[in-house]
Amino acid sequence: MKPLKPILLVSLFVILCSCSSRRALTECDHPSGWCKEIRDISDKSWKYAQLSKNVYNKPFQFNLDKYFEKIEDFENKEMDFYATLYKDKLTGMYVFAFRGTDSLKDFSTGNNPANQKQNKYGLEIFDQCRSKYNFKECIVTGHSLGGGIATHISLNREGATAYTFNRSPVFRNKLKIKNDRYTIVENGEILKAARLFGREPNQLYTSIGCSKGNPVKQHDMKNLAECLTKIAAFENNEAKESLLLNHISAE
């Protein structure tokens, strides 16, 4: 299937009072059909995209046992919060994966701009783990609400690089810490319009045409994770192995 034309926004992205910039795409005649910038971000993010799918604990789970050791799960049933801490087996880097919206309860506790309970709780967990495991740098990742939590932490704590997918626009930028932040969204997914009303942090913002369908279908994390893995697999042997291991067609 020929991919839809990707659009890459490299942004200091604050709608209405924004300093927004656009970078031209290059090397778009690649056999994959994807431009260099899309291939690069797919190569960086595909493992974190898979973790962001797995943290939902649904029947399909990407096999990432070769790359990550599960350290600890965090659950707060009162607000329906869930996250998992992993450790990269190769680099030793800690990775937090935050679950997105999975119920009406966590929608109200996580997506309420006036009372951001899950963002606050995510910071508490982050601080506890930093003290417990004594790390200076880590990765925070998540999809939808989980991406909003990851963004909130990356904006308010040093050393937290964020990879987020179709993320929520609900977070607070109090400390304006300049960590690296990579935001990847489907062109037509349901939260894309909502993000126009939120001030977004300095980031590499990538809008990509991975799938067709209605806005809800395009919001799906499994589809986006598979697509990013397929793109990465053109030049990354680990991603290629992941497709085989998870019985995903490269087409």
Image (tube, rainbow, N blue to C red):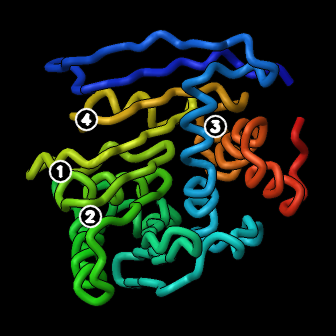
First in sequence: mark 1 vs mark 2: 2
Q: Amino acid at mark 3?
A: Gln
The N terminus: image quadrant: top right
- The picture places residue 67, in percent across and down from the top left corner, at 64, 70
Q: Which mark is residue 7?
A: none
In the picture, residue 233 is in which quadrant?
A: top right
Dot 3: what SS? Answer: helix
Separation of marks 1 and 4 at Cα, in angstroms: 13 Å
Circle 2 residue: 119
Q: What is the crowding at mark 3: few (fewer than 14 residues within 10 Å), some, or many (at least 20)?
A: many
Mark 4 vs 3: CB contact within 8 A: no
What residue lies at 49% left-to-right and 42% top-to-bottom?
166
What residue lies at 61% left-to-right and 39% top-to-bottom?
42
Mark 4 vs 2: CB contact within 8 A: no
What residue lies at 28% left-to-right and 89% top-to-bottom?
132
Circle 4 residue: 202
Circle 1 residue: 172
Q: Is residue 179 above or below residue 67?
A: above
Q: Is residue 43 above or below residue 56?
A: above
Circle 3 residue: 218
Q: Amino acid at mark 4?
A: Asn
Separation of marks 2 and 3 at Cα, in angstroms: 24 Å
